[in-house]
Image (tube, grey):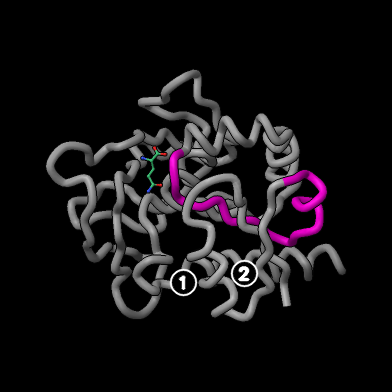
């Protein structure tokens, strides 16, 4: 079974470990460069993106993660993780940086004010079966999708909340809290496709 890391600097690490194990993957915590180099894919959890950014630099993880992304490592970012995968962010605090890789502009805390957290069904042309029931928790929004990225899911009003580009997947919501496993499965599919290519 594939070995999938969950970046464990801050955030809802445990929920992603559980989701990955439910799908039959081996899930391991990743905090150090040598741990990153032992995994076939990576989840960047929700949490506080500026904190995860700061800790990733303190732990010497920013450059290795950027290199892994450039080398085609499959990576799935949820919420703060989506922010960290975005090439451009609006509302950064404290000189916050990202790993980048997704050709999108993401606005942090886009649903601030009275409705910081909510659940809703999404519209997706990509996912088969039941509608995606998504939990948004101080969530970001994809404000602009560049030519290299593509939309995976949107709110009923059309605002984009899930994107993909090559081996990267980003969602503004938390599938791991509503039992929605299709995005984690998408990550595992990319991992097995990459393993096949590399073995050939
Ligand atoms: N508001 C957080 C941030 O900007 C993201 C919230 C979340 O991951 N649930 O990093």
In this rendering, the answer to whether 122 lies above or below 64 is below
Name the residue tied to disc 1.
182
In this rendering, the answer to whether 126 lies above or below 8 is below
Name the residue tied to disc 2.
188
What's the residue at 33%, 42% (across, down)? Answer: 141
Q: Position of residue 69 (x, y in %)?
A: 68, 44
Q: Is the CB of mark 1 within 8 Å of ligand 1?
A: no
What's the residue at 58%, 51% (across, down)? Answer: 168
Label 1 close to label 2 by CB (< 8 Å): no
Question: Which of the 4 image quarters holds residue 116?
Answer: top left
Bounds of the magenta span? Answer: 32-48
Q: Is residue 46 magenta?
A: yes
- Mark 1 Cα-neighbour bin, 10 Å: few <14, some 14–19, many ≥20: some
Q: CA distance from mark 1 to mark 2?
A: 10 Å
Is 68 displayed left or right of 25 in the figure? Answer: right
What's the residue at 34%, 41% (across, down)? Answer: 140
Residue sticking out furthest to the left: 114
Image quadrant for the N terminus?
bottom right
Q: Is residue 113 magenta?
A: no
**Circle 2 SS class:** helix
Mark 1 or 2 closer to N-term? 1
**Quadrant of picture, ligand 1:** top left
Is 55 displayed left or right of 95 in the figure? Answer: right
What's the residue at 52%, 63% (across, down)? Answer: 14
């Amino acid at each position: 079974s594939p070995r999938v890391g969950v970046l464990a600097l801050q955030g809802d690490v445990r929920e992603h470990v559980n989701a990955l194990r439910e799908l039959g993957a081996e899930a391991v915590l990743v905090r150090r460069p040598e741990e990153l180099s032992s995994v076939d894919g990576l989840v960047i959890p929700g949490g506080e993106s500026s904190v995860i950014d700061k800790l990733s630099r303190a732990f010497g993880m920013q450059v290795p993660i950027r290199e892994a992304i450039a080398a085609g490592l499959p990576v799935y970012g949820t919420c703060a993780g989506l922010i960290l995968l975005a090439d451009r962010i609006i509302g950064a605090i404290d000189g916050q940086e990202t790993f980048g890789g997704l050709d999108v502009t993401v606005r942090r805390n886009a649903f601030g004010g009275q409705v910081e957290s909510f659940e809703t069904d999404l519209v997706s042309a990509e996912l088969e079966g039941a509608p995606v029931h998504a939990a948004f928790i101080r969530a970001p929004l994809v404000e602009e999708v560049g030519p290299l990225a593509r939309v995976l899911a949107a709110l009923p009003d059309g605002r984009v909340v899930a994107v993909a580009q090559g081996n990267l997947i980003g969602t503004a919501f938390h599938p791991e809290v509503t039992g929605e496993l299709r995005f984690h499965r998408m990550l595992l599919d990319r991992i097995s496709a990459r393993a096949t290519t590399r073995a050939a």
